[in-house]
Amino acid sequence: MKFTLILSLAILSHTTFSQKLYKDKSSTLSSISNKGYSCSKDSRDPNIYTFRQYDNYGEALVQLTFEGNYLRKAVYIHQDPTKTLTRLRDVYAKTTDSEADTFNPPSNGSGSGIASHTPYYDGKARFEANNNYSSSRYTFTVILLD
């Protein structure tokens, strides 16, 4: 029984994808809540919410920035520096030829590109990965463009 539970959790942890983001604030927050995560509002800025996410990239602290009722940006902060570039690589792997032309290959620990219909967001978004070892800043950013 214990082995089955551990095996199930291991399989589930490798098949869980990132939290889907929506342009609408209430849809995004509901989706996060439905996945079992608790989202908290920043005490200094009511437009910023954070939650801790566990997916196939490991653990990430996610910061959502809203403008009114619209999501503008999501920042995934990792402790493992390899995860930011892995997220960007996985977005790039699913792009169309024209979208692939917008991607800048990671150099000096950062890369970016524009893509639509990704596991993160169904609309058009700019994706940025920062893997700067000198500043210990390991972020993957999704900026909604539509």
Image: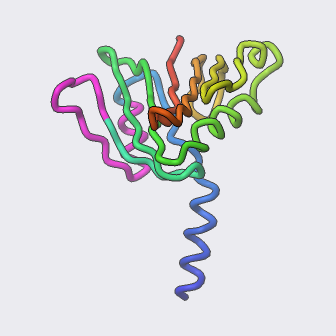
Query: Which quarter of the rendered picture does the N terminus lie within?
Result: bottom right
The residue furthest left is 43
Q: Position of residue 107 (x, y in %)?
A: 67, 24
The residue furthest right is 97
Q: As drawn, is 34 to the left or to the right of 91?
A: left
Specify start and end residues of the magenta stretch as a single range. Answer: 27-49
Q: Residue at x 63, y 55 (%)?
A: 15
Q: Position of residue 145 (x, y in %)?
A: 53, 12
Residue 68: say if magenta: no
Above or below residue 79? Residue 9 is: below
Q: Residue at x 65, y 21 (%)?
A: 116
Q: Position of residue 29 (x, y in %)?
A: 36, 35
Q: Nearer the viewer, residue 81 or 101?
A: 81
Q: Residue at x 37, y 38 (%)?
A: 30
Q: As drawn, is 112 to the left or to the right of 105?
A: left
Q: Nearer the viewer, residue 136 or 119?
A: 136
User: In terms of image quadrants, where is residue 13?
Assistant: bottom right
Q: As drawn, is 21 to the left or to the right of 123?
A: left
Residue 43: say if magenta: yes
User: In terms of image quadrants, where is residue 131?
Assistant: top right
Q: Position of residue 18 (x, y in %)?
A: 55, 43
